Image: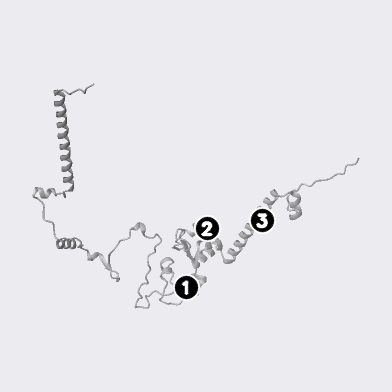
Amino acid sequence: MADKVPSQEQLARIEENRRIAKERLQREALQKQQTESTSAAPPQNTQQNNGNSKKQPSAFQRKKRAIDLNYCEYNFSTMKDTKGGFIVEEQVEPEAKKPKNDEKRVFDPPIDLDPDTDLKCEACKSPDLDMNYVKYFAVFVCRACKDAVPDKYSLLTKTECRQDYMLTDSELRDSTRLPVWERPNPHKSTYSNMLLYLRKHVEAFAWEKWGSPEALDAEFEKREAEKKERKQKKFKTKLAGEISSKDFQVFFGDFGVNVHRYVWIVRQN
C-alpha cells in the first residue's frame, strides 16, 4: 500500500506551526540574554541617574569627620580628680541602696581655751572625753576611766539586764530612766540591732526597784529555786506517766504519789 501524500492545506499548516515555534524560541533566547546581562552589570545609584548625587568624600575627609564626631563636652564642675590618672563623673548613691545601720560619724568637739568652761571627765578631770557616752548617755567620762572602772562605765546588753538585774521589757523601753545606745548587730547585719545600756544607770534603777543589792540577790536565788522546783516537778510527772508504779518506787522512792500495791493470797486446796 503506497504512502498517503499530504495535501496542500496540511503542508501550509505545518509550515505555519514551524514558523510560530521558531519565533517563540527566538523570543525566549532574547529574554534570557537580557536577564543575564542585567544581573552581571553593577548596580547603579538612582541618585546618580537623577543627577542629585554628591561626590563621595575622600579618605582624609572621612577621617577628619570621624575625629570631629567623637568629641564630647564634659562639665568639669561635677567631676573630681581621683589621683589615678582618670577623671570620673560623681555618682550620687540613691537612698534605697544606703545601709540602714550607717551611723553618722561622731567628731570630737574642739577644746575650749578657757579651762573653766571646758568639758572634763567626772573622774579624772581629763578633757579627752568619749563622745559616744556624752551623746547617748549624757555621761562625761574619758576613754581611760571608761576602761579602768568597768563596774560603773561598762556596757550591758538587753539580755544581761533582764537576766542579771531582772528588769522587764517595759522598764528597759523607758529611755528617760535608762538611756540606750542602739548599734548594728555584730553577729549578722540582718539581725535586730543591739541595745546597750550603761551599767551605772542599770544598777541605780535596779537598786531603786529591789531596795538593795542584797534584796536583788535574794530575789534572784528565790526565782532560781522556784525554777528548779518547777523543772523537777515536771520531770517527775513525766516519768510517772511513762514507767510502771513498781519501777517508779524502786528507783525513785515514795514521793507522795499514791502507788497501787497488789496483795497476793495463797489459795488453799
Labels 1, 2: front one: 1
Residue at 11% across, 50% down: 48
Q: CA distance from mark 1 to mark 3?
A: 43 Å
Dot 3: element: helix
What amino acid is found at the position of numbered circle 2 in the picture? Thr
From the image, which quarter does the N terminus lie in? top left
Looking at the rendered structure, which numbered label has been put on residue 168?
A: 2
Q: Tell which circle, 2 or 3, labels the residue nearer the N-terminal end.
A: 2
What amino acid is found at the position of numbered circle 3 in the picture? Gln
Q: According to the image, label 3 marks what residue?
A: 232
Check contact, mark 2 vs mark 3: CB within 8 A.
Answer: no
Would residue 177 be visible to someone looking at this image? no
Q: CA distance from mark 1 to mark 2?
A: 27 Å
Q: How many marks?
A: 3
Q: Position of residue 51 (x, y in %)?
A: 8, 50
Dot 2: element: loop
From the image, which quarter does the C terminus lie in? top right
Q: Is residue 226 left or right of residue 143?
A: right
Question: Residue 165 falls in which quadrant of the image?
Answer: bottom right
Q: Is residue 203 left or right of residue 45?
A: right
Q: Tell which circle, 1 or 3, labels the residue nearer the N-terminal end.
A: 1
Q: Residues within 10 Å of mark 2 (few under 14, many from 20)?
A: few
Would residue 26 be visible to someone looking at this image? yes
Q: According to the image, label 1 marks what residue?
A: 146
